């Protein structure tokens, strides 16, 4: 019988080996990722995208590459980005990502991007921004009145926002659909950790989400479309090998369980 | 520091130990402390303290209501905490129920029915109907009805299987992220 420590060890070595070898595999892009890419690619230069960092710091290895790919795409296209967080732990993570990418691409704060910071009570925050963003965020993350910035001055509510992207590791994107989507007809894209995908597919199929991109796979696909390999592409090869290994371990476990059951039946038969 | 704490968390794989416990408690404490600081800095100071300092007295109403929430720790004044609680629940229900009904029920029903002309849509319609039938506990699951509920169970198993696979995918991504950090940013091997 394989001990759990052996399984952890084999899995760890497999991930380690693939990360060291760095194989580059070309992926087929899923229609949902393509849809997100096309939606952002079709936006006019100067349009505004609102990106909400609705995740905990612990999910960063998975949702970080997704956020980076989407922020890169928006900034490269000349689309203005307004960042915010409805999860306290996403606040600094979102600001760092946005500020870092914007600086690298030569985008100016207050004109090409703006970070609003964190607000608790997501229901009130999402509904409030549908009426007037400055009633929820009177100032940006640095404490400047948002009307004092050219980007903040021209955005009043969701009618001035071409797309809302919720980068989430939980159910926060559904609240964007329910409050911003249903009530204010905002277009919503969900960028999720893989564990949430099955819960969101009905929203995508019903047209309540403009697009959905998830996990390492989604990040790797997006990076491929951007022709800018990053953490998603690097991690995808390791994830593929780890998945194959898990599948093999599941088969081994089932064979072992089946043979154990057979042996027990044989022993019971001999005693009977 | 980050690398050592990562290793401390992974030491749990060898069994529960004091190093893991220390890292776990540190994580919980830091998360809570960070949330508290960010809430005070981003919400309490700009939305309550600064307006009050400038003489914006109507802000006192939500401040008093918010403070009243803490009265539930006093056995004598507990009743007063129910006023802000009732307001929060009432406003929350008023905002949520119509939105959820629209997004989770009506739009989903509409999409399920309108898409049923295609093969995919028909499969989804059968899946929804048979899965819902499984949860009708007032009727015995025998004969034709029982076969329908059995199909519903298979649909649920497919859903659970897919969700479990995605969960493994997520957890593996977290492992890869940490291993990449240890090999790259810490050891400089990548």
Image (tube, rainbow, N blue to C red):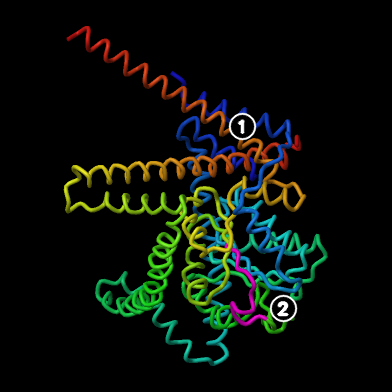
B63 above or below A270?
below
| Quarter residue B63 falls in | bottom left
Q: Closer to the camera, A36 or A240?
A: A36
Q: CA distance from mark 2 to mark 1?
A: 45 Å
A182 above or below B171?
below
The residue located at (70%, 61%) in the rendering is A71
Q: Badge 2, how many Cα within 10 Å: few under 14, some, many 20+?
A: many
Which chain does the numbered disc 1 sit on?
A: A
List the single residue furthest toward the front.
B117
Which chain does the numbered disc 2 sit on?
A: A
Question: Residue B75 location, x and y as percent?
Answer: 25, 71
Residue marked by disc 2: A151
Q: Is residue A257 magenta?
A: no
Q: Closer to the camera, B117 or A12?
A: B117
- Magenta range is A155-166
The residue located at (54%, 92%) in the rendering is B55
Question: Residue B46 location, x and y as percent?
Answer: 57, 79
The residue located at (54%, 41%) in the rendering is B169
Residue marked by disc 1: A241
């Amino acid at each position: 019988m394989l001990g759990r420590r052996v399984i952890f060890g084999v899995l760890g070595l497999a991930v380690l080996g693939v990360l060291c070898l760095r194989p580059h595999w070309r992926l087929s892009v899923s229609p949902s990722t393509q849809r997100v890419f096309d939606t952002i690619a079709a936006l006019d230069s100067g349009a505004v995208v609102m990106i909400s960092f609705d995740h905990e710091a612990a999910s960063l290895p998975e949702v970080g590459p997704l956020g980076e790919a989407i922020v890169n795409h928006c900034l490269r296209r000349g689309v203005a980005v307004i960042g915010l967080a409805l999860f306290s732990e996403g606040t600094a993570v979102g600001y760092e990502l946005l500020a870092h990418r914007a600086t690298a691409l030569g985008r100016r704060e207050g004109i090409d991007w703006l970070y609003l910071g964190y607000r608790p009570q997501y229901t009130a925050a999402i509904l409030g921004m549908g009426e007037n963003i400055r009633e929820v965020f009177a100032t940006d993350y640095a404490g400047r009145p948002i009307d004092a910035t050219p980007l903040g001055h021209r955005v009043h509510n969701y009618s001035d926002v071409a797309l809302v992207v919720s980068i989430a590791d939980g159910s926060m994107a559904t609240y964007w659909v329910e409050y911003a989507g249903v009530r204010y007809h905002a277009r919503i894209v969900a960028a999720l950790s893989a564990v949430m995908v099955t819960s969101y597919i009905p929203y995508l199929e019903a047209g309540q989400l403009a697009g959905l991109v998830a996990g390492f796979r989604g990040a790797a696909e997006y990076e491929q479309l951007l022709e800018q390999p990053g953490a998603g592409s690097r991690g995808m090869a390791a994830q593929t090998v780890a998945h194959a290994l898990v599948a093999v371990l599941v088969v081994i476990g089932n064979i072992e369980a089946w043979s154990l059951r057979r042996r027990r039946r044989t022993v019971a038969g001999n005693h009977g | 520091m980050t690398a050592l704490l990562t290793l401390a968390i992974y030491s749990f794989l060898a069994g529960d130990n004091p190093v893991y416990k220390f890292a776990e408690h540190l994580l919980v404490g830091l998360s809570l402390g960070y949330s508290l600081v960010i809430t005070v800095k981003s919400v309490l100071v700009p939305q309550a303290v600064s307006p009050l300092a400038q003489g914006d007295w109507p802000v006192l109403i939500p401040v008093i209501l918010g403070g009243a929430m803490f009265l539930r720790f006093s056995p004598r004044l507990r009743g007063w905490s129910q006023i802000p609680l009732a307001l929060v629940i009432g406003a929350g229900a008023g905002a949520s129920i119509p939105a959820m009904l629209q997004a989770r029920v009506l739009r989903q029903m509409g999409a399920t029915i309108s898409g049923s002309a295609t093969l995919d849509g028909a499969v989804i319609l059968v899946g929804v109907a048979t899965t819902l039938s499984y949860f009708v506990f007032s009727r015995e699951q025998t004969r034709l009805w029982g076969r329908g509920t059995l199909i519903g169970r298979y649909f649920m198993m497919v859903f659970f299987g897919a969700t479990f696979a995605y969960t493994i995918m997520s957890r593996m991504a977290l492992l890869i992220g940490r291993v990449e950090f240890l090999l790259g940013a810490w050891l400089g091997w990548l």
